[in-house]
Image (cartoon, helix red, strand yellow):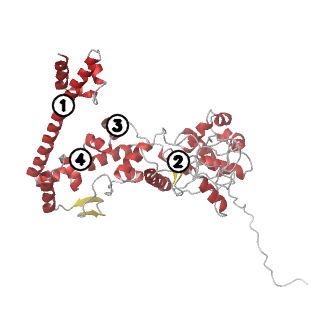
Amino acid sequence: MLSSVLETYESWDLRKVAIPSRSRLYQLDPIGIGTPLVESLTGYISRLAEAHCVTPKALISRELVSFIPKTYKTTNLFEMRSLTGALNGTGTMALDLVTVLESLTLRSDLRFLTLLTWTDIFPQRRLLRARRAWCPYCYEEWYSSKDKVIYEPLIWFFEAVTLCHWHNQSLYQQCPHCKRELPPLASYSRPGYCPYCLKWLGVTANYPSSDKTPPSKEEIIWQTWVIKTVGELLANTPHLPKPLRREIVAQAFCRYVNQFTEGNTAAFARMLEIPKNKVWMWQMGKVLPELNVILKICFTLQVSVLDFLTQETLKENSSKFPAAPQNQVRDSSTKKLEVKFDSDRTQQLLENMLQANEQPLPMTAVAKRLGYPKRVLYRHFPELCRAISAEYVKYMKESRIKRIEHCCEEVKQAVRQVHTEGIYPSEAAISTLLAKPGCFRDKKVRAALRAARR
């Protein structure tokens, strides 16, 4: 008998299911993006090859090389092992390989394993080393920990970084077993292992003793600062809205020259002990300074490289330059440093400097010591400033006279010595006996030489 009640059956959705696109290569997660210990691209390739159970050479030659739109081939790449360090840098090789890997793994963050973001800021010379460097103690700690992966941080490839800050040990650049230097990427590269003898590079019980001398206290201080500021660059790279332009380097130098020496490039160069023409070329944007040079400048100014390039305010905690007085306050709305002028205190300090029996200083140095611009001091105390300047000019004149007299006496003694040896007292012969041969530029010294000859 037919049922009088209708039954409802589940309907089927016959529309095609949207299947997400599949990557040709395994989407291996990079390590440490957004941190100072971000992974290097060459190390990532080694780990990616290991994930596919092949060697890096097989991965590149059989998968990547056909997608690289360049004339160089995989065999040439591995024959020129020292050039594989460029894969972590700012050049075309790094850009080509990142583009191919991002398309095959469907990832968009592999460029942060290189320095491509800083292509227009840092020149390639003396940026990255051509050989691998590593800390065996870091390798051993990662190996002993179950939740850590053995990899190669990008910061180890910087030429300026020679120390492991976490262990205060110099980075190794030679396999302790086979005594060979290791390229950044080789046919059988594997993080933590030598690609030639295939032995473990971490510290073990039978690890060969190192002949490296322990780093000095000064080196530890310098390397600690370098690692901190370079790590800050790497950690902030993914957070930059766009790659920085070349012009910001020139703008940074102009800004700091204006704030430290009121636009006096020569004074700024003397302060940093750098040739004036170099600073001028950097200000004009004609030449880019190497990263090592920027690090030394920023260390002197006690400002990080990232702040040097991206911030307009200065940090007033330099050890070489005078500390900012306590009467300086920072206005967060204007981002400029406002100085409350203490007239009585400043006048007393100027009078003390004028009466002190010490070597006179130029007004530029006096202004830095007091923490005020020189023009402010001249506006409030013109007589005291002129008196201090006059004392400095007098001191320099007296010093020059004494120096010339000393040179003249030194020339006379040299002429006597040469004459007793039977040698004609020419200017060239006398110059070899002087502490400062350049003193012959003064006409009084040349006159003393002629008089001594007679």
Q: Quadrant of residue 391?
A: top left
Image: 8 above or below 345: below
Marks 3/4: CA–CA distance: 18 Å
Q: Reading the chain from its start, which is encountered first: label 3 or label 4?
A: 4
- Residue appearing at x 10%, y 54% in the figure: 381
Q: Amino acid at mark 1?
A: Ile
Q: Amino acid at mark 4?
A: Glu
Depth check: give the residue in front, 240 or 187: 187
- Residue appearing at x 27%, y 41% in the figure: 265
Residue wearing tag 4? 262
Image: 407 above or below 242: above
Q: Quadrant of residue 6?
A: bottom right
Helix or strand or loop: what does disc 2 sit on?
loop
Helix or strand or loop: what does disc 3 sit on?
helix
Q: Nearer the viewer, mark 4 or mark 1?
A: 1
Q: Nearer the viewer, mark 3 or mark 1?
A: 1
Residue wearing tag 1? 404
Marks 1/2 in contact by CB < 8 Å: the verdict is: no
Q: From the viewer's perspective, is 101 left or right of 383?
A: right
Q: Nearer the viewer, mark 2 or mark 4?
A: 2
Residue wearing tag 3? 278
Residue wearing tag 2? 213
Q: Quadrant of residue 329?
A: bottom left
Q: Amino acid at mark 2?
A: Thr
Marks 4/1: CA–CA distance: 33 Å
Position of the N terminus, as image quadrant, is: bottom right
Q: Reading the chain from its start, which is encountered first: label 4 or label 1?
A: 4
Marks 1/2: CA–CA distance: 46 Å
Q: Amino acid at mark 3?
A: Lys
Position of the C terminus, as image quadrant, is: top left
